[in-house]
Amino acid sequence: MNFTEFRFQPAIEMAIKKCGYTTPTNIQQQAMPHLLQGRDLLGLAQTGTGKTAAFVLPTLQRLTGSKAGKKIQALILTPTRELAEQVHGNIQQLAQGTRLQSCTLYGGVSKAGQIQKLRQGVDIVVACPGRLLDHLNSKTVDLLSVEVLILDEADQMCDKGFLPDIRRIVKKVPHQRQSMVFSATMPTEILCFVEEILSDPVTVKVDHEKPTATIKHALFQVAQGQKTTLLKHILKHEEMTTTLVFTRTKHKAKNLARQLQQCGFKATSLQGNLSQNQRKKAMDGFRTNTFNIMVATDIAARGIDVTGITHVVNYDIPDTVETYTHRVGRTGRAQQTGDAFTFATQDDVKMIRSVERSLGQKIPLKKAQGISMKPHKAAPAPTSAKMNEKRKNASSSSRKKQNSKPRQQRSSSFDFGLSAG
Ligand code: AMP
C-alpha cells in the first residue's frame, strides 16, 4: 500500500514525500480510510507507530477545502507541552503546501503571544487542557467553529487528572463534529469517557501493549553505585549514536547530564525543573544533534519524538511495565531498529520479570566488555574464627595491601539470577 491510494490533495501528497514517508504505517493504513470518510475513531496505538500523521493527514484533507486562517476548525488536546510542540511540528511539516495555520496553547509561557497568534487567525489549535481553559475563561479563544476534535495520549490525560478539564472543554465544542481519541492503553475510566466523546466510533488497534518488534532489549547487571561508571563505559564502547537515558528523579537527570558533560560527552537533560525556554533549548539541541545524549525523567520525556534515537537506557528501572513500554518506544520508531538497555540491580528483579512477561520473552543479559563491575550481594557475616584469623593477618598484610591494586571482581560472581528465569 502507498499514500497515493488515499487521494490526498496534491499539496499534502507533496508534503508526505518531503517528509520521506513512502509506506503508510500500520495505524495509518487502518485508521485513515475511516477518518477520511468522516468517522469517529478510537485508536489504540503508542507513540512511535506514526499515529500523529494518522490523525493529522485526514484532518488536513478535510480542512484544505475551507477558508484558511479564519477560525479554529480543529482542536487537538495533549497531556504535555512537549507533545503539543511535537504535534504542532508535525502539522507544520505536513501542512507546508497548504494555507492552514496551527498554533500551540500551553502553560509556562506568556499568554500574550498566544493571544496574538490566535488573533492573526489559526485553523488548528494544539493545546494542553489547563491553558486552553484559561483562554476559554478569558474569552480569548472561541471553539464554536471546531469540526474536528482529537485527544492524543488519552491515558496520560487521565493519569494527570485532566478528565474534568477535558469535559469542560468538550462542552464548548459543537456537538456536530468528527472526534478521535488516541491512547496507548485503555483503562476502564477512559473507556467510559471515550463513550461520552465519540459517536459510533471505529476502533483500530496497533501493538498497543508491546513495544514495537524492531526494538532489541538487553539487561546489564549492575550495583546501584556503579551505574554511572557503566553508563560512561558503554557510551564509549557501544555504537550509541543518539541516546536517551532515563533516571527516576529530576535531580539525578540533571547531575548525570552534568557528569557526562564533564567527561566530554555531548549530553543535556530534560526534567521538570527547567523553564519552558530551557526545555525547548534542550529538545532542539537533541533534535539537531548538538547533544547526542539526553538524560530525562519520565514526565519530561513523555511523547518525545526525535527520529533516529538509536538507544534508550533505563539507568533507573521504570516503576511500571507501561512506563517501560513508553520509554523504549522512543527508539525503534517507524520501522527503524533500536536498542533498549536496562541497568538492573538486585532490587529490580521483580520488575524485570513483569516486563519480560509483558514482552513474552526473556530479556538477554549483556556484559559490558572490558570493565569489571563489583558484586552487589552483601558479603556473608564473618565467623568469629575467621575474624581472629583476619586480625592476625591484618598487620602483616596491611603494607602489602597499600601497594597493591584493588582486587578484580569476577563477573561470574555477580549474578542475581536474572538469566535463570
Ligand atoms: P508518532 O507515532 O506519531 O510519534 O510517529 C513516530 C515517527 O514516525 C515520527 O518521527 C514520524 O515523523 C514518523 N512517521 C510517521 N509516519 C511515517 C511513515 N509513513 N513512514 C515513515 N515514518 C513515519
Image: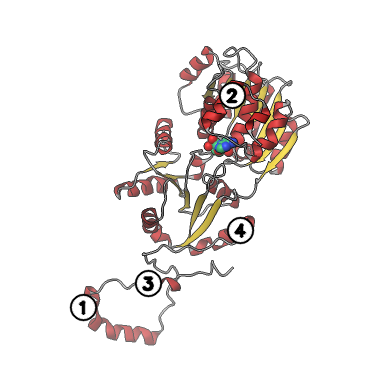
Discs 2, 3 touching: Cβ within 8 Å:
no
**Which image quarter holds the N terminus?**
top right
Comparing labels 2 and 3, the label whose residue is closer to the camera: 2
Residue 36 percent across, percent down from the top left: 70, 27
Q: Nearer the viewer, residue 58 or 180?
A: 58
Q: Marks 2 and 1, how far apart in space?
A: 77 Å
Q: Marks 3 and 1, how far apart in space?
A: 21 Å
Q: Is residue 275 left or right of residue 339?
A: left
Q: Callout 1, which amino acid?
A: Arg
Residue 102 percent across, percent down from the top left: 54, 21
Q: Residue at label 2?
A: 12
Residue 389 percent across, percent down from the top left: 33, 86
Discs 2, 1 touching: Cβ within 8 Å:
no
Label 3 CB less than 8 angstroms from ligand 1: no
Comparing labels 3 and 1, the label whose residue is closer to the camera: 3
Q: Is mark 4 on a helix, strand or loop?
A: helix
**Image point 52% across, 25% down: which residue?**
92
Q: Residue at label 4?
A: 354
**Which image quarter holds the C terminus?**
bottom right
Q: Callout 4, which amino acid?
A: Ser
**Image point 53% across, 52% down: which residue?**
318
Q: What element carries label 1?
A: helix
Q: Callout 2, which amino acid?
A: Ile
Q: In this view, does 400 lie to the left or right of 363?
A: left
Q: Callout 3, which amino acid?
A: Gln
Position of 279 relative to 266 (above/below): above
Q: Residue at label 1?
A: 399
Mark linked to residue 61: none
